[in-house]
Image (spheres, rainbow, N blue to C red):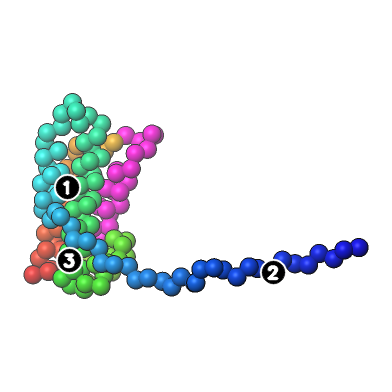
Amino acid sequence: MTTIRPATPAPSARPPRLPVPLPPPPPSVSTPEELLAGADRLLGTATASTTGVWPRAVALLLRHALEEALRRYWQTRKPQLARCPPHAQALCLESYADPDTARRWSATWAGLSRACHYHGYELAPTQGELLAWRDDVDRVIGALTLRTR
């Protein structure tokens, strides 16, 4: 009878990887106000070539404006938080800004995130929904900009 010996693990040829700190995010090319203006242009000029695309494009522009406003807020207020994901930044927002601004940011971001993704069983956001989100984004940008001055 032969005995089967357990295989010994082969030593790894690679040295163990150490965690590498994330580099700071690159600065955005556009300001929140410019992104908002781009969304306004799309909202006002839907054409045959943009049919079916413009609602999600507007939602993406609005969400990016919201995220950029928050990143710029943290860049002036607490720079180490500007490198964190938007979810983490939003969690900290209530401690630094007023609760209404924090809740509005989170609710608007959640609605826009849902609207950005295509689902075969859901309709694209309507112009009325996009206009309401646009107004909310404008209020949040204004509130965050006032707090950084």
Which residue position holds label 2? 8
Secondary element type, mark 2 = loop
Q: x%, y% of residue 19?
A: 41, 71
The structure residue drawn at horizontal position 12% and vertical position 33%, both measured from the top left corner, is 45
The reply, left or right, for residue 20 in relation to residue 79 is: right
**Does the magenta portion include 104?**
yes
Place residue 49 in its image quadrant.
top left
Q: Earlier in the sequence, mark 1 or mark 3?
A: 3
Which residue position holds label 3? 73
Q: x%, y% of residue 115?
A: 29, 43
The reply, left or right, for residue 108 in relation to residue 43 is: right
Q: Is residue 47 above or below residue 108?
A: above
Question: Which is closer to the viewer, label 2 or label 1?
Answer: 2
Question: Which is closer to the viewer, label 2 or label 3?
Answer: 2
Q: Is residue 135 visible to us here?
A: no
Q: x%, y% of residue 131?
A: 17, 42
Q: Amino acid at mark 2?
A: Thr
Q: Residues within 10 Å of mark 1 (few under 14, many from 20)?
A: many
**Does the magenta portion include 12?**
no
The front one of 149 and 140 is 149
Q: Tags 1 and 3 in contact by the CB under 8 Å rule?
A: no
Q: Dividing the image into 4 quarters, which one contains the N terminus?
A: bottom right
What's the distance in space between the residues labelled 1 and 3, CA to CA?
A: 19 Å
The structure residue drawn at horizontal position 22% and vertical position 29%, both measured from the top left corner, is 51
Which span of residues is magenta-colored? 102-123
Q: Residue furthest right?
A: 1
The structure residue drawn at horizontal position 18% and vertical position 69%, both measured from the top left corner, is 75
Place residue 84 in its image quadrant.
bottom left
What's the distance in space between the residues labelled 2 and 1, CA to CA?
A: 62 Å
Q: Which mark is residue 143?
A: none
Q: x%, y% of residue 61?
A: 20, 47
Q: Amino acid at mark 3?
A: Tyr
